[in-house]
Image: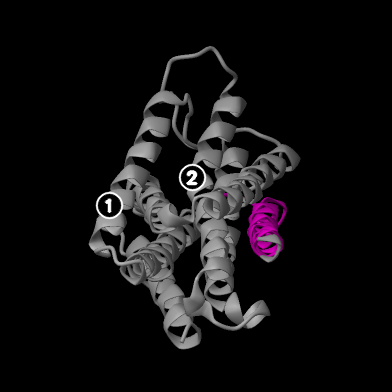
Amino acid sequence: MTDAVLWALAGTGFSFFMTAAGSAMVFILKKEDIFLQRIFLGFAAGVMIAASVWSLLIPASEMAEEAGVAGWIPSCGGFILGVAFLLVLDRFIPHVHPGSDVVEGVPVHMKRSSLLMIAVTLHNIPEGMAVGLSFAAAAHSAAYGDAGAAGMLPALILAGGIGLQNFPEGAAVSMPLYKDGFRKRKAFLMGAASGAVEPLFGLCMVFAAGSILPVLPWLLAFAAGAMMYVVVEELIPEAHLGDHSNTGTLGVLSGFLVMMALDVIFAV
């Protein structure tokens, strides 16, 4: 368990660092570039789709079958629960998306900056959960065999993929905030802070999985469902800003291809 905690902390810490690095683009780019934003958001969506399938749903099914349970049961059940979890958060937690004046969730009297911060933080929760659970699965599954970094390779690939897509995602957060009137420094800090939930939820999932190993396949599928909700609800629609744009589509396909290649080539 100690190894899983340390690896999860390193993996989610890397994701947080990449979010902060991407948010720092607000100091380099002079203004929000819609073309780049479509690519960034599309790429992030593609990575998350591939990661949900190869790094979460497939391992969940395999672990369940090794335990003598039909693989589709925890995969489908956990997926549905993950979607329901994000649906509830999206429905009840007050937030407003960058570039929008519509407050979603329960009506409250809060500053726009606070509502924006909540919005950009929500979709990082599933990513932290996914990385933490992946390391927990690597630590407790005989399928990973070798000790050390070699045994953690599948989880390291997922953490690397999530970190990779967090760079453009961080920029896609800080730039709209800057456009909404925030100073560059505050836009950067808010964009970077949105990734701070990943180490927190990653570690929580490691500890939770360590105490209830029989439901680990369900938790992996749960993280996949939560990530897919974010992709469909937020990333893909925002990646297709404008009419008849194929830029976001190519971004999604590129992200999917990169993450799929990492899993297929190295996780063997």
Q: Is residue 222 above or below residue 5?
A: above
Q: Residue at x 41, y 53 (%)?
A: 215
- Crowdedness of circle 2 by 10 Å Cα count: few (<14), some, many (20+)? many
Q: Residue at x 56, y 46 (%)?
A: 173
Q: Nearer the viewer, residue 181 or 206?
A: 206
Q: Residue furthest right?
A: 185
Asked if the stretch drawn in magenta spans residue 32, the answer is: yes
Q: Nearer the viewer, residue 66 or 94?
A: 66
**The N terminus lies in quadrant:** bottom right
Q: Residue 157: x, y in percent?
A: 54, 74
What span is in magenta?
Answer: 4-33
- Crowdedness of circle 1 by 10 Å Cα count: few (<14), some, many (20+)? few
Q: Residue at x 45, y 78 (%)?
A: 263
Secondary structure predominantly adopted by residues drawn in magenta: helix
Question: Which quadrant of the structure image shows residue 86?
Answer: top left
Q: Mark 1 vs mark 2: which is more N-terminal?
A: 2
Q: Which residue is mark 1?
A: 243
Q: Is residue 8 above or below residue 105?
A: below
Residue 165 in view of the camera = no
Q: Amino acid at mark 2?
A: His
Q: Which residue is mark 2?
A: 123
